[in-house]
């Protein structure tokens, strides 16, 4: 509960007292009661104003917030927990994003559950600039990975967010694409094989191409492939994105 909610509650009490006094005056016509109630309401309003000003200037941040409490953590009973990535993923240039999901930088003071800290709600969406969208790129089955690692010293640690994707070397369009975006800030949304969407990067620290390896192998069994990876940093590991991805709509029939 925020401090503003407490003020709202106190204001509601004051209004109820005033209404009660008004009805009492009509029914009983007791002038003394009216004077007492008026004084009480005035005192209560002054008290609320005083507490509001004092709290904003003197009380530590978070005192009037319902902080997360310690609780037992139970195992997720969902058996669908496949490893690996799907075969289609998404990217967008940072400059093409107009509004960012708040869940990319969650508020630790107002979160209602631990899961809220690493989950972007379904109504907390990426909003794109006019005519701009997320676009897709491929990945071989069992050829990609999303990985988050806690890094930094105690007291100022954060998370390194990363993702790698593998494809055949003859995907020249993809190869040239990686060369083009090599130094451009992007946001990556990777789809896990179990269907979950993971976001790599945020507004303050977007993702960049970290590596791009191309090899043709020494033997047929070695394969002929390319692998590229992205890296970003954040206060949380790559969060789960529950909303819709703003992708380019398919062309109209006959277009």
Image (cartoon, rainbow, N blue to C red):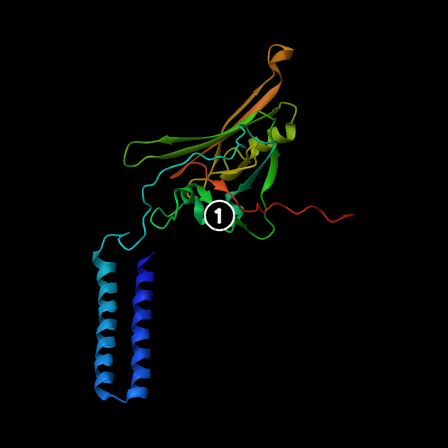
Residue sitting at 24 percent across and 59 percent down? 55
Where residue 232 appears, x then y in whole percent?
A: 44, 35
Residue sitting at 33 percent across and 49 percent down? 109
Res. 37 image quadrant: bottom left
Q: Mark 1 points at which residue?
A: 121
In the image, taking residue 105 as reference, residue 95 lies left or right, namely right
Where residue 134 appears, x then y in whole percent?
A: 58, 43
Q: Is residue 8 above or below residue 142?
A: below
Residue found at the far top of this picture: 219
In the image, taking residue 247 as reference, residue 186 lies left or right, namely left
Res. 23 image quadrant: bottom left
Q: In this view, does 214 lie above or below 30?
A: above
Residue sitting at 32 percent across and 31 percent down? 152
Task: Give the number of callouts.
Answer: 1
Q: Is residue 212 above or below residue 234?
A: above
Crowd around label 1: few <14 · some 14–19 · many ≥20 (10 Å)? some
Res. 159 image quadrant: top left
> Observer-nearest residue: 35 or 158?
35
> Observer-nearest residue: 76 or 242?
76
Callout 1: SS: loop
Q: Which quadrant of the figure contains the N terminus?
A: bottom left
Residue found at the far front of this picture: 28
Where residue 208 appears, x then y in whole percent?
A: 48, 34
Where residue 185 appears, x then y in whole percent?
A: 49, 39
């Amino acid at each position: 509960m925020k401090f503003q909610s407490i003020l709202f509650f106190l204001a509601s009490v004051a209004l109820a007292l005033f209404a009660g006094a008004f009805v009492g005056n009509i029914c009983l016509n007791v002038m003394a009661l009216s004077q007492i109630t008026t004084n009480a309401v005035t005192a209560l309003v002054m008290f609320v104003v005083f507490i509001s000003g004092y709290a904003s200037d003197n009380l530590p941040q978070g005192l009037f917030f319902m902080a997360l409490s310690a609780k037992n953590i139970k195992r997720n009973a969902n058996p669908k927990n496949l490893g690996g990535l799907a075969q289609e993923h998404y990217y967008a240039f940072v400059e093409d994003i107009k509004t960012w999901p708040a869940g990319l930088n969650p508020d630790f003071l107002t979160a209602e559950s631990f899961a809220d800290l690493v989950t972007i709600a379904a109504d907390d969406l990426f909003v794109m600039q006019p005519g701009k969208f997320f676009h897709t790129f491929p990945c071989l089955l069992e050829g990609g990975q999303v990985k988050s690692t806690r890094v930094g010293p105690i007291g100022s640690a954060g998370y390194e967010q990363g993702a790698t994707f593998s494809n055949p070397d003859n995907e020249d369009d993809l190869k040239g694409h990686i060369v083009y975006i090599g130094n451009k800030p992007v946001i990556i949304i990777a789809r896990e094989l179990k269907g979950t969407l993971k976001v790599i990067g945020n507004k303050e620290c977007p993702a960049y191409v970290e590596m791009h390896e191309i090899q043709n192998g020494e033997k047929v069994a070695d394969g002929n492939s390319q692998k590229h990876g992205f890296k970003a940093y954040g206060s949380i590991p790559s969060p789960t994105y529950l909303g819709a991805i703003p992708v380019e709509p398919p062309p109209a029939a006959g277009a």
